[in-house]
């Protein structure tokens, strides 16, 4: 029988120091107790037991972290990294755009949940081939938390989609290739040119007689059956307002019907009063066919579109 003190612990071995200044490695499977640094032990051949007079001493924070399970260290490190990235991203988003886009926030949480789920699932598979039950149990807990976060993110997304409040637009592309032709706008231009060439928008001669603008059938408009350049008016709720390249882009639900959403472009020259999300608004302008934008799921959403020349909110 020999007396010793545990001076080092790893996943597979422990190192025990003796009074004569020597040390020896032992397989961690030889222990019949949970090892800790400075534990006094008795060694009987291949069996190592805890000495009766051994008391667990308080360890410093650094030592406690060194004895923490590897999977716990990885999860803590990743959480700290994600938190740091989130702070940097949110700061950049607020400085650049003046607000944080829900799409970016959703993508961040969705990505984190996927990464943590894959990581913990992989580590769980590794622990199946190891004898340490403690690692396996801890990994199961982290995996369950990651999967619950993943499912919760999906549920939130489905709730939002079911409420018809589609995700914010980022890039708008034109589906219709037809051109605007009106007596008030002699130089014809495509709907995409209207959005990208803001200078041309300010050249349009506005017909200030609002009685010349009429309601149109949304279904016909959605099927691109309304001639581009038709003088139209819509009334509804602003779902989103986005400033981009000298113009303002809106998503408006006609008569608060989320099944009837229109994309609206307003040039700075016609933007004379601040429009905020949630405003009830009446818009007068020219139809511009249909346009598409990308959702948070990277799918394309195509909606009727118009160029607004006047509005009341």
Image: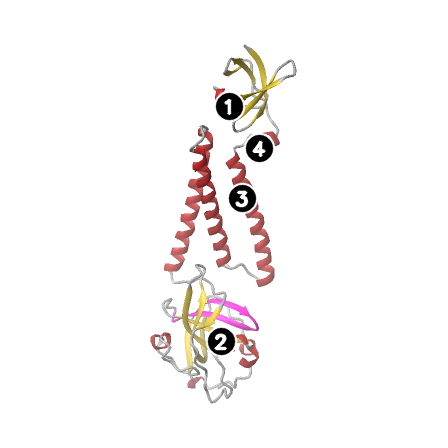
Question: Residue at left 47%, top 71%?
Answer: 173
Q: Are marks 3 and 1 in contact (CB under 8 Å)?
A: no
Q: Position of residue 174 (x, y in %)?
A: 45, 73
How far is mark 2 from mark 4, CA to CA? Answer: 58 Å
- Observer-side mark, 1 or 4, equals 1
- Residue 51 seen in the figure: no
- Quarter-of-image position of residue 97: bottom right
Q: Which residue is mark 3?
A: 79
Residue for point 34% across, 75% down: 219
Local secondary structure at mark 3: helix
Q: Is disc 4 placed on a helix, strand or loop? A: helix
Is the C-beta separation of discs 2 and 3 under 8 Å?
A: no
**CA–CA distance in space, label 1 to label 4:** 19 Å
Q: Is residue 127 visible?
A: yes
Q: Quote the CA–CA distance across marks 3 and 4.
A: 16 Å
According to the picture, the residue beneath numbered tag 4 turns out to be 65
Q: Disc 2 vs disc 3: which is toward the camera?
A: 2
The residue that mark 2 highlights is 192
Q: Is residue 152 left or right of residue 56?
A: left
For the residues labelled 3 and 1, the Cα–Cα distance comes to 30 Å
């Amino acid at each position: 029988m020999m007396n010793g003190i545990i001076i080092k612990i790893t996943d597979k071995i422990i190192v025990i120091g003796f009074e004569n200044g020597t040390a020896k490695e032992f397989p961690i499977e030889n222990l019949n107790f949970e090892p800790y640094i400075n534990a006094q032990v008795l060694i009987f051949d291949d069996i190592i037991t805890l000495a009766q007079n051994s008391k667990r001493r308080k360890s410093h924070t650094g030592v406690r972290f060194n004895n923490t399970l590897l999977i716990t260290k990885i999860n803590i490190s990743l959480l700290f990294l994600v938190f740091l990235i989130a702070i940097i991203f949110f700061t950049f988003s607020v400085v650049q755009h003046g607000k944080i886009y829900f799409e970016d926030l959703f993508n961040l949480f969705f990505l984190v949940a996927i990464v943590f789920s894959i990581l913990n699932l992989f580590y769980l598979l590794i622990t199946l081939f190891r004898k340490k039950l403690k690692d396996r149990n801890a990994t199961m807990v982290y995996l369950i938390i990651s999967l619950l976060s993943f499912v919760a993110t999906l549920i939130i997304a489905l709730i939002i989609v079911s409420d018809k409040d589609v995700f914010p637009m980022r890039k708008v592309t034109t589906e219709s290739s037809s051109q605007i032709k009106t007596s008030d706008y002699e130089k014809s231009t495509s709907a995409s040119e209207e959005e990208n060439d803001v200078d041309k928008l300010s050249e349009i001669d506005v017909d200030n007689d609002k009685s010349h603008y009429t309601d149109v059938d949304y279904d016909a408009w959605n099927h691109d059956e309304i001639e581009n350049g038709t003088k139209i008016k819509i009334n509804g709720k602003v779902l989103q307002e986005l400033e981009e390249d000298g113009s303002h882009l809106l998503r408006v639900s006609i008569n608060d019907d989320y099944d009837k959403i229109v994309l609206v472009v307003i040039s700075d020259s016609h933007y004379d009063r601040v429009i905020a999300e949630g405003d009830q608004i009446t818009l007068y302008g020219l139809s511009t066919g249909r346009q598409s934008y990308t959702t948070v799921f990277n799918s394309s959403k195509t909606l009727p579109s118009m160029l607004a020349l006047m509005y009341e909110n």
